[in-house]
Structure formats: C-alpha cells, structure tokens
Image: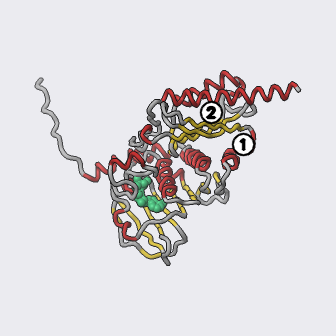
Amino acid sequence: TRPKEPPRIHRLDESVVNRIAAGEVIQRPVSAVKELVENSIDAHSTSISVVVKDGGLKLIQVSDDGHGIRYEDLPILCERHTTSKLSTFEDLQSIKSMGFRGEALASMTYVGHVTVTTITKGQLHGYRVTYRDGVMEHEPKACAAVKGTQIMVENLFYNMIARRKTLQNSADDYSKIVDLLSRFAVHHIHVGFSCRKHGASRADVHTVATSSRLDAIRSVYGVSVARSLIKIENSDNNPSSSVFKMDGFISDSNYVAKKITMVLFINDRLVECTALKRAIEIVYAATLPKASKPFVYISVVLPPEHVDVNVHPTKREVSLLNQEVIIEKIQSVVESKLRNSNEARTFQEQK
Ligand code: ADP
Ligand code: MG
C-alpha cells in the first residue's frame, strides 16, 4: 500500500489558541483564586475575602480594599499581556509583585464570565464592567462601591466540557482553595483573609490583620498547633555565600500529625520545594522520631538573581541557584533548634 499523504498544516484560529492557553494558566478553580488573591495583595490590600460556589465552578468572588483600577485602564484590563507591573525584561530581575505577565485576568475571560467592580481613591462612585474573550462587553457602568476591587468569575470552564466534567466529580476543589488561603494568611499577616462557601454564614478561613505571626498561625491552624511551635531564624551575610535570610516556625515533639504541613515562601512567593521538604522530614525522623511529620512555616529571602521567577504560573516548584547549599543551611538550623528544645525538655523532666 502507498504511504498516505502527510496531513496539511494550518494556522489555528486565534480563539482556539487563546482558549487552550487560558486552560493552561487556569487549570482548576484554585488557580483562578490564587491569581485573583495575588492581584489583591499586589494592590496593597489589607483585607481580602473570597466566596466560592460549587467548588469555584459556579462562582469565585474575590473582594479587596486595594488601590483599585483606573477607569481609563478598564478597556484593556483583560487583554492578554497587559500589566501595570512590568515594562522591560530587565525589570524582572528586581520585581517585587507576584504578577507581571498580564495573563491571569485575560485567561479567566476565555474560560469563564468575568465581572469587575472597582473604585479608586477620591472617586464618588465605582465602575462595573463584564468581560468575554479578553474584551469589555459594554462601557463601564457607574455603580456604588466602597474601596478597592471585586472580581467575580462565573461558570468557569463553561466552554471546556471535558474539564468541567472531571472537576465536577472531584469534591476537593474547595478544600484546595481553603488550603491556599490558609497559607497566604500565615505569610501575609498584615492582610486579613476570609474564605467561605456561598451562602454559608461561617467562614472556613478567617484572620484579621496582625503583627504577630504566631497569632496568624493560631487563627488558621488552631491553638494546639500554635502551642507546639519553635521559632527559627537565621541570616547569613557572608559575602562568599549568597546573602540569605530565613525565619519561621517549626513544630516540636508535642505536635503529632499524619503528614507534614509545609508552608514555604521564597521572596514572598508561595512555592513548593520537594527537596527541602524531604530534607526536613529526614531531620525530624532522626531527631524526633515520634513527631516525624511536622508543621513547618519557612520564609526565605534570597537575592533576586538567585531565584528564577520567570517560570510558568502553574509551576509551583521553584528553581534556585545553589539549591543544595540553601537546603543544607536550613536543615542545620532546624536540626540545632530541635536538639536544643529537646535537651531543654529532657532536662526539665529530670529536674
Ligand atoms: P498581572 O498581575 O500579571 O499584571 P493580571 O492579568 O493578573 O496580570 O492583572 C492585570 C492588571 O490588572 C494588573 O497588572 C493590575 O494593574 C490590574 N489588577 C488586577 N487585579 C487587581 C486588583 N484586585 N486591584 C487592583 N488592580 C488589579
Ligand atoms: Mg496577576
């Protein structure tokens, strides 16, 4: 038989390209919540509340009291690659905001229905406008508004049947959202967070802005966790190594759990680092075998040139320069703290 003719190559429709790309940025409801909450933090909010219906498929609503969005910017707000946070590629080197690629809101409009309500300082009223596929559906309408921005995403993945189906069968999206907000609340203590299901009177995460990390951990993870924590701190200004600062809280021998909880922020970005997690588990297994699944909150600050932030938004695993050195350093700080607290305890018991 004769070989078949090769299939023709053609250019995809822009709407198809955009929807596929958007589906990658916004993989699940929790990815949309993360992007929206990060935008609220970038807007210097002190209070952020999240309401979720049907695990986020029906509704995700994030309200903040940040600086708001200018009326003139509303027409391009949800276009792809429009941002107030980055101008040149070099800016990436020193960027402090979590967002910079101007992709998140646009993506949401390609896979859901987005409504923005916002007011800026000194204005008598706000504006409300809805977006579809990157564009405003109508002129912004004047409306009452208090302070800041509220973004509503409805019917997420309405045009991606398969995605919607697989997500409908998984009941855990709301708990992923609660977990995300819990982590943010522990790190961004100057912001009050709340998260609840639509129609519920009780919030599942509820914190007020505070200056005490321990208070924040207590209100998110509970008294018994907060009671069994040890503070860790280390800074290393040795010019031969990278300038490095870390601080956090780790659980002591009183904390017993089925699995490790590790809340890790590097340069204020919520990240995962499997290698560090393993390294800490090893220290606990060796030092406190009975409490070998710890609670760990660590915030690490590294020179920006040591962290590559230019990774895909869905990639939470971070890439660091000198990763082994940093992990060893953290490991040794954790180990010496654990040993000290354990010795103090044994000594107490012997008295
Ligand atoms: P990025 O965060 O990467 O800039 P986004 O698509 O998430 O891109 O947001 C686009 C722009 O919209 C932001 O740069 C910011 O100027 C504005 N914006 C989004 N959300 C908010 C908010 N909650 N408060 C104020 N401005 C916002
Ligand atoms: Mg953003």
- Where residue 332 sits in the image (x, y, percent)? 61, 27
Residue 43 shown left or right of residue 138 in the figure: right
Q: Residue 71's quadrant in the figure? A: bottom left
Identify the image quadrant of the C terminus.
top right
Residue under label 2: 260
Indicate which disc residue 226 carries: 1
In the rendered structure, are the residues bearing label 1 and label 2 in contact, judged by CB atoms less than 8 Å apart?
Answer: no
Q: Is residue 166 left or right of residue 234?
A: left
Where residue 320 sits, quadrant-wise, is top left
Q: Residue at x 50, y 71 (%)?
A: 121
Is the residue marked by circle 1 packed among few (<14), some (14-19), or many (20+) residues within 10 Å?
many
Ligand 1's quadrant: bottom left
* 258 w.r.t. 140: above or below: above
Question: Hey, what amino acid is under mark 2?
Answer: Ile
SS assignment at label 2: loop
Residue located at (40% from left, 55% from top): 85
The outermost residue toward the left is 2
- Return the residue found at the far front: 239
Give the distance between the C-alpha atoms of the residues marked 1 and 2, in whole angstroms. Answer: 15 Å
Say few, some or many: other residues with alpha carbon within 10 Å of mark 2 (under 14 / 14 to 19 / 20 or more). Answer: some
Ligand 1 contact, mark 1 (Cβ < 8 Å): no
| Position of residue 272 in the picture relative to residue 197 (left or right) | left
**Mark nearer the N terminus (1 vs 2):** 1
Q: Is residue 119 above or below residue 134?
A: below
Q: Where does residue 329 sit, x and y in percent of width and height?
A: 56, 29
